[in-house]
Image (cartoon, rainbow, N blue to C red):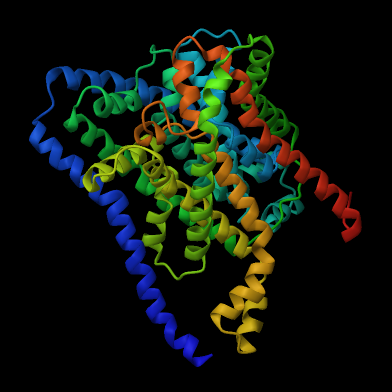
Amino acid sequence: MLEADARAPALRRTTVALVGLYVVIALGLPLARLGAAALDGGALTSVELAVIGRAGLRSLALAGVVAAVAGVFAYPLARVASPAALVTLVLVSPLARALGVLELQLPPGLAATLLAQLAGALPLAGLVVALGLRAIDPAWSEAARDLGARRGRAFTTITLPLLAPALGLAALWAGLSSIGDVTSLELAGGGHSYGLALALRDAILMDDAPTRAFLLCAVLVALALPCAAASLRALEVSTTRRAPWRRPASLASRTLGGIALLLCLTPLLGLALGAVRAPAGHTGAQLSALVPTTLAVVGATTAIAAALGFALAFAPLPGRLAALVVTPLALPQLVQGIFTLELGELVGARPGLALTIAGLLPASAAVAYAGARLARAAVPSVLEDSARDLGAARRARLRWLWWPLLAGAALGIAGVIAALQLGAVDAPAFTSGPGGSTLAIGMTIVARGSGAAAVHRLVLALSIPPLAALALLTWLKRQARPALGGPR
């Protein structure tokens, strides 16, 4: 026991050094390389300034609307939908949302882009607010009600001020996701909503504009860092107290939450209609060649990310370094793809399978880290304290305590990561080889042309597993409650 405690400072120093090295390699080095290329490329031309200006105004306006709507609907959505349902809706890929919106007979443009982005931003905002609700002690609101305050008064004076940081974070995260969403702009926008994400993509892949690329990447990284720090604080607060929020939702919350839920599900409805109407074709056979590669990418990314995330969740990390670990969650994935491409060029690695895994790994590891911390906090700390008092070393506690208790959570987190990677497009767009390394990239290439209708069934098929898993989980919980003595 004493020997294990003596090794703890050394383990802490090693962990901090490794995570610091990862941050430097994954974030600092690519940005510095882009900066050096920008110095060689010279100042921005008047044409580039005009492009960035117009694209920036469009992106900020769209992101402002998405952030405002997410801020308004996040609390009602968190009250009417379970966290599992919100996670499931987050897992619906941007490709599915974009194609589903177009099947509602909306013309490609701003309205279609807005609906596609809201369908992804709302469940994400609701999930952030649901974490915030966990940290609010219901006794405060109940005390206000006991003192005669009406429901609305108790909400505005107690719940809303305590929930304000979570609502602000939800709006900020929704706005960032809108700015960095390439797929919705490209497919649902149809080229009519040229924003910062497309300007950044074109700067790397088409225009060879390093100064523009560095400027936009630096701005997006600067916006992502405070969002990541706020996310970590929200995660820490939600793990300190896990007070249940059992008070029934008001009629207004149920109404607004139902509207938000309908907005989230609308693209899936459109995608289902498109799959029914789509003619049979040979596109599925052509894309089937990408299935083995996709499974290899998803399997390797999930296994490595889950292991890294859980290892970091059990390692003592300083707050600032932990915030950098979760930064890939707030960083637009096209930026992560560009950074991975820059690292690949630095070491001589060509786009392909290995580079795609490397591009998907940071965000996947961040998801695993956040999930592992939530899962670990759900286990009473008295169990680990008792095991430590009985002389169990760290390795013994991991094997005989944490692994049996968290094995189910680890499988669930691995499933979330796998579902995210199945539909990932923005990062692999920069790291895939010719023709695409994954099925999602291949379907996006087809959808850009005249074959959008032919991939509806495949896109819908990739969206069904998370929904089916949620239905199965809900059914299992209902079956288990009577056996545990809880309400059915």
Q: Is residue 358 above or below residue 177?
A: below
Q: Is residue 208 above or below residue 135?
A: above
Between 347 and 184, the one nearer to me in the picture: 347
Horizontal side, residue 3 vs residue 256: left or right: left
One can see residue 438 in this view:
yes
Q: Position of residue 98 (x, y in %)?
A: 52, 21
Which residue lies most toward the bottom here? 2
Q: Residue at x 27, y 46 (%)?
A: 343
Q: Is residue 123 above or below residue 236?
A: above
Q: Quarter-wise, where is residue 265 in the image?
A: top right
Between 60 and 342, the one nearer to me in the picture: 342
Q: Position of residue 5 (x, y in %)?
A: 48, 86
Between 348 and 59, the one nearer to me in the picture: 348
Q: Position of residue 132 (x, y in %)?
A: 58, 50
Horizontal side, residue 453 vs residue 172: left or right: right
Horizontal side, residue 230 vs residue 266: left or right: left
Horizontal side, residue 343 vs residue 237: left or right: left
One can see residue 160 in this view:
no
Q: Residue at x 44, y 81 (%)?
A: 8
Number of callouts: 0
Q: Residue at x 28, y 18 (%)?
A: 54
Between 173 and 287, the one nearer to me in the picture: 287
Q: Quarter-wise, where is residue 103 in the image?
A: top right
- Classify the position of the N terminus by image quarter: bottom right
Q: Position of residue 376 (x, y in %)?
A: 60, 64
Q: Residue at x 37, y 32 (%)?
A: 433
